[in-house]
Amino acid sequence: MKLLAYCRHGDLRGRIGEQVPEGMSLEWLARPDDAASRLQSSDVRGLVLLVSDWPDSEVAALIRLFAPRPVVLVDMTDSGHWHDAERPACVRLTGLDELKDLLHRLFSPQAYSPARTLALLSGRNDCDGAVVAIYAAWSLKKRGAGRVLILDLAMPQTDVAAYLDARPGAGLLDLVENRQRLSPGWLREQGLEATAGIDVVGLGSDSGLGQISAEALKATLERLETHYDHLLFNLTGVQPSPLLDLIAARCDQHWLLADQKHRSLAAAVDLAAHLFGQGIRPGGVNLLLAPCHRHVLPGRETVQAQIPLPLRGALPWCAQLLTHINAGTLLPPPQELAPLADAVDRALWLREPESWWRRLTQRTG
């Protein structure tokens, strides 16, 4: 991923370069006239502006050109004029001392790990988002999280409750219609708990999505966020739409699920471009190979080198997965599915697998 930066005075360039998150490169614009073509590049994720003048028509033009993608503006004016000026929502103001932390929050996959709100997306339905959602929720509970809600809004079918052999409770439309009544007690009465500490809300038998206004859905999600510690959205199969955009805007992380087919990977890149066009935090838009076969090309290393998205992880193919889905025995993870559950755990918390040598030395130590 690439960051572009512009500063009329070049004496601060070295200090800025030291603050770029790992995995990103920084390129400087020599003059604003260079911006038109370079800002449209598919691998440019953000723009950093060091501004010492007010007003500055060149800076204002760069902001308009780059919006709604994130623009980081370091206000170097004597009186902080930019802090008092009206500016688009994509512009984040900061000082030099706070720049590194802001760049990390915007562009690093490690930020917001684990996510309080996580969206699982795949426009082609090549991957089973229900399984990923279940094991992400299980990982959170295993590590001591409070209550977790899976909002299963996948298209064309929602499978999380069925995979857990749980009776479907209230659907999304029920929650929206009763949003003024949402409380821990009312939610408990709706039969949402699929397993201890994990609630599931699907679309319901009559989803009624066309009846839900953006304002009503937003108000419902705001109330749910006050009653749950984590919200996981299974949006696999949901195409770019106002529904997807509204939910994505509320999420800390966005995992794009794809397998190793070229068309699946290309669809993930296209969906990422749509999210970036909505101003979504670039560091939170990550690719998850689900599953990844070791003997299939392109392999993980090739995908990681060629796809312009951070690779969140790779889920192993497990021969017994369908057997356990059919039997309703995904939780707790059986021994045959432990590698899959552990891979989701690593993606959620961004930790690397611990080597057998490290485990041995820890025990003997």
Image: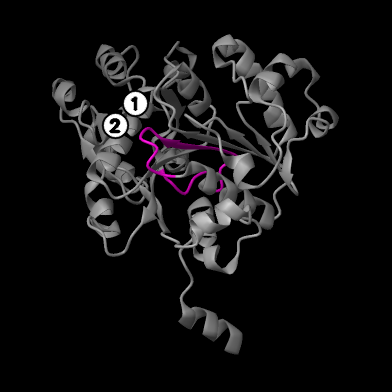
Looking at the image, can residue 143 be seen? no
How far from the left and from the top, in percent, is residue 67?
34, 19
Q: Residue at x 21, y 26 (%)?
A: 40
How far from the left and from the top, in percent, is residue 227?
74, 32
Q: Residue at x 71, y 38 (%)?
A: 167
Looking at the image, can residue 188 be seen? yes
Dot 2: within a 10 Å radius of its alpha carbon, few (fewer than 14), some, or many (20 or more) residues? few
Region in magenta:
108-127
Please name the colour scheme applied to the rendered image.
one colour
The residue wearing badge 1 is 274
Dot 1: within a 10 Å radius of its alpha carbon, few (fewer than 14), some, or many (20 or more) residues? some
At numbered mark 1, what does the secondary structure look like: helix, strand or loop? helix
**Is residue 30 inside the magenta stretch?**
no
How far from the left and from the top, in percent, is residue 360?
53, 85
Q: Residue at x 42, y 17 (%)?
A: 82
Instruction: Locate residue 218: give its quadrant.
Output: top right
The residue wearing badge 2 is 270
Q: Measure the C-alpha gap from mark 2 to mark 1.
A: 6 Å
Give yes or no for contact between labels 2 and 1 (Cβ–Cβ under 8 Å).
yes
Residue 293's place in the image compared with 51, above or below, is: below
